[in-house]
């Protein structure tokens, strides 16, 4: 058996990032940049006012209290042609270019305006301000040619705004990895299948639905290739349909029973298989095979029990999707929470327990594992909001001990959400 971390590193090492494509900015959310994004413009393009007020010369304000003469007005979107001379001021609005000669903007709340109308009226300023006050300098955000976003960045809504500001209507990103998905098991039916009503030996196939949604949330495109009987020939035939995928993901048939054929059929006979037992609970039978040229794409075999399939998908498939999109530095530092119950010492397999975490009034994050850890129960998985991780050979836990958790609010856990 190998450790979870070792298995994850081997999977990442065995995958080749997919190619790139150019997409409109509007479709960039959640995608991963294939190339550095360099600013195509300077922002702001000139010194602009950060406030509504009056632009003037800081030297004129040194006395502390002064009267200036209004000589013009400038709003966002058009330059001011004139210059602000000694004793003069220009009405200015947020975002407007600061006129030549002016080096400070006094906010309108801090001035008194004489009753006279129009240009020539007196603007009384009571307090002095330093040069540069309320002015955003040209290039203060970024300069044209500056590195804005690095290749490998998964784009958040904040990044999309930044890319737009840098004048990028198009983005060069990794294309979405194509993930072929199949489930095996003679007992399985698709939801809604009429045979479910007549046979108590059949169950609804749920793994592919869970996995498909997880794959999509990690930036992948799902190619459902089917539900396969526990039969060598059918499995070999249908697996051929995955030939154009970047990764084939299977669930079920991964164990050591007579009907568990995945290893024999997709493992390339054995030597090409990277591993098939990971020291973890739930989910020991997990397999990974790198791409077999002319035969099948890279392959990840997940266990059939729904909770095991989910836990393995979180620990291996999510990082695999990241690796296919060029990201190999998966984060393994987990937040910790105070366990509310005693737990026995753990044996040699890492244990990922379905659990609920929440903050108490003092701001402390607490976690309580569910008393039922059956790896077949989706109801408990759905109710949980995190996994509580027990390290291999961890000693017993007393209430109040801090333990690592994997919160589900971040479906990747090993990377940032595209918020
Ligand atoms: P297996 O890994 O094929 O031995 O399956 C382990 C358990 O998971 C069995 O009880 C299966 O019925 C169940 N199972 C396997 N595949 C799926 C699936 N795609 N959806 C729901 N349950 C499954
Ligand atoms: Mg089976």
Image: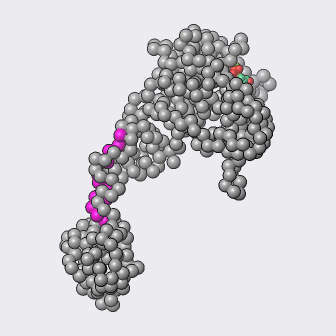
Toward the viewer: 229 or 89? 89
Q: Would you identify the image quadrant in which residue 252 lies?
A: top right
Query: Measured from the top left, where is residue 11 in percent x and y?
Result: 53, 24
- Residue furthest top as drawn: 269
Q: Does residue 290 appear in this view? A: yes
Please tell me whether residue 157 is drawn above or below residue 241 in the rendered image.
below
Left or right of 18? Residue 209 is right
Query: Measured from the top left, where is residue 211 in percent x and y?
Result: 60, 32
Task: Identify the residue at image location x=31%, y=47%.
Answer: 146
Q: Does residue 225 appear in this view? A: no
Task: Identify the residue at image location x=25%, y=84%.
Answer: 69
- Residue furthest bottom as drawn: 115
Toward the viewer: 270 or 190? 270
Task: Identify the residue at image location x=53%, y=32%.
Answer: 319
Total label count?
Answer: 0
Q: Would you identify the image quadrant in which residue 286 lies?
A: top right
Q: Would you identify the image quadrant in which residue 141 lies?
A: bottom left
Please identify the quadrant where the N terminus is shown.
Answer: top right
Please tell me whether residue 103 is drawn above or below residue 290 in the rendered image.
below
Q: Is the magenta region chiefly helix, strand or loop?
A: loop
Magenta range is 36-48
Query: Measured from the top left, where is residue 155 in percent x and y?
Result: 45, 43
Query: Measured from the top left, where is residue 333 in percent x and y?
Result: 57, 38
Residue 223 falls within the magenta-colored stretch: no
Toward the viewer: 148 or 103? 103
């Amino acid at each position: 058996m190998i450790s979870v971390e070792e298995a994850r590193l081997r999977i990442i090492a065995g995958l080749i990032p997919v190619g790139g494509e150019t997409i409109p900015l509007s479709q960039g959310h959640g995608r991963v940049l294939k190339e550095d994004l360099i600013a195509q413009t300077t922002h702001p393009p000139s010194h602009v006012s950060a406030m509504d007020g009056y632009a003037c010369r800081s030297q004129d304000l040194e006395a502390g209290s002064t009267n200036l003469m209004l000589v013009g007005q400038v709003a966002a979107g058009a330059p001011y042609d004139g210059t602000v001379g000694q004793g003069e001021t220009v009405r200015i609005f947020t975002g407007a270019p600061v006129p030549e000669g002016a080096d400070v903007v006094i906010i309108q709340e801090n001035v008194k305006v004489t009753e006279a109308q129009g240009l020539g009226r007196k603007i009384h300023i009571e307090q002095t301000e330093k040069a540069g006050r309320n002015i955003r300098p040209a290039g203060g955000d970024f300069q044209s040619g500056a590195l804005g976003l690095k290749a490998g960045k998964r784009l958040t809504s904040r990044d999309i705004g930044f890319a737009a500001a840098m004048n990028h209507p198009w983005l060069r990103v990794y294309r979405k990895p194509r993930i072929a998905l199949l489930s095996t098991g003679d007992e399985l039916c698709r939801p809604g299948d009429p045979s479910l009503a007549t046979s108590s030996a059949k169950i609804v196939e749920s793994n592919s639905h869970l996995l498909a949604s997880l794959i999509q949330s990690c930036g992948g495109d799902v190619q459902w290739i089917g539900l396969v009987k526990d039969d060598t020939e059918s499995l070999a035939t249908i697996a051929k349909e995955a030939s154009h995928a970047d990764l084939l993901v299977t669930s079920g048939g991964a164990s050591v029973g007579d009907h568990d054929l995945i290893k024999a059929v997709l493992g390339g006979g054995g030597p090409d298989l990277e591993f098939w037992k990971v020291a973890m609970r739930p989910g020991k039978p997990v397999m990974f095979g790198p791409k077999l040229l002319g035969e099948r794409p890279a392959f990840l075999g997940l266990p059939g029990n729904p909770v095991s399939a989910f836990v393995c998908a979180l620990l291996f498939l999510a990082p695999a999707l990241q690796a296919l999109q060029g990201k190999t530095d998966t984060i393994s530092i987990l937040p910790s929470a105070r366990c509310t119950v005693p737990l026995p010492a753990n044996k040699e397999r890492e244990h990922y327990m379905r659990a609920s975490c929440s903050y108490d009034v003092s701001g402390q994050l607490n976690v309580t594992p569910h008393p039922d850890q059956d790896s077949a129960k989706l109801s408990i998985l759905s109710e949980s909001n995190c996994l509580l991780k027990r390290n291999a050979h961890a000693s017993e836990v007393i209430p109040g001990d801090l333990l690592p958790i994997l919160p589900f609010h971040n479906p990747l856990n090993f990377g940032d959400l595209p918020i």
